[in-house]
Amino acid sequence: MSHDIECQGSCPPHDAQATHEDEHDASPSSNSRRRFLQSAAAAATVGAAPYAKAQTQTPSAPQPVARTTVPPRAVKLNINGRDYTLQLEPRVTLLDALREYAGLTGTKKGCDRGQCGACTVLSNGRRINSCLTLAVMHEGEAITTVEGLASNGMLNPVQRAFIEQDAFQCGYCTPGQICSATALLTEFDAGTASTVTADVRRRPPQLTDEEIRERMSGNICRCGAYVNIVAAVQSAHRGTVGDGTSYTYSTFVIKTTDVA
Ligand code: FES
Ligand code: FES
């Protein structure tokens, strides 16, 4: 709002014409405008203060993360019929305990997060992903790895079937596949149903290829040897596997456990 009153020099120094005019304008609208400008200026000052402070502060050095270590303790495991006492931190997985502490590298580490099945071993006869479980949780249990399936130098039927059916290429997934298939046959003989069993209230009448594929679905083979793997499991189930006299135990060991 403009006005005709001239400043007589009693006003504080100013240079904005609008401000000068407001100081002489006593109307209600001018008063509310002045209050608005004053509060806005105050708010801007408060808001800018932390920023200005931050500009002048030197960033402090990151604080070191406090690491708490848990001392290793003795963990007793029976692996492949032999007693081991391993000094393990509680966070060591069963897979790492087998490979890094017991020196049994037949069990493979693929994904290390329960997705590929390469680390499958048997715990008290039950197949598990050893990368998903801690070694201390299995204290006193009987662990079977691929190195423990043969007895007296004689491969078990699943191992022999894998050789006869040429059920692997690179061999990396094979120890897990064989442990899994070995447990699968036991589970089937015990009458365990799967998600493709037509009537889960009854014992599955036969181990079809569909049943095998479903029951082995946790074991991935990146070489794509699935057709021959199913044939090998079927052969072991039907008892049509040879006695293995045409090859030696080392044939299998070289093919499936030399990939550390
Ligand atoms: S390494 Fe355990 S599931 Fe892949
Ligand atoms: S044989 Fe190579 S990943 Fe299965």
Image: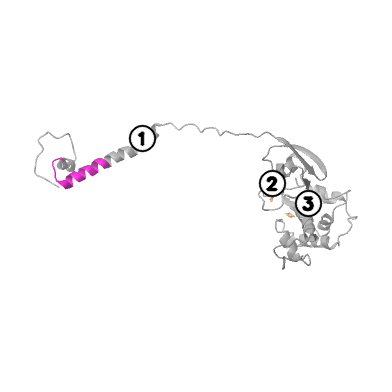
Please tell me whether residue 101 is drawn above or below residue 151 in the rendered image: above
Give the residue type that dot 3 points to.
Answer: Gly
Give the residue type that dot 2 points to.
Answer: Thr
Decide which of 92, 176 is in the foreground and name it.
Answer: 92
Give the residue number, with chain letter if any, for mark 3. 125
Q: CA distance from mark 3 to mark 2?
A: 16 Å
Nearer the camera: disc 1 or disc 3? 3
Ligand 2 picture quarter: bottom right
Determine which quarter of the picture holds residue 141: top right
Q: Is residue 30 magenta?
A: yes
From the top left corner, tell me how far across and down residue 29 is, in percent.
17, 47
From the top left corner, tell me how far across and down residue 245 is, in percent.
91, 55
User: Which numbered disc flags the more N-terminal residue, 1 or 3?
Assistant: 1
Q: Is residue 90 magenta?
A: no
Give the residues drawn in magenta, as a range.
Answer: 23-39
Give the residue number, with chain letter if any, for mark 1. 52
User: Which numbered disc flags the more N-terminal residue, 3 or 2?
Assistant: 3
Give the residue number, with chain letter if any, for mark 2. 133
Query: Is residue 174 rendered to the left or right of residue 240?
Result: left
Q: Residue at x 84, y 54 (%)?
A: 156
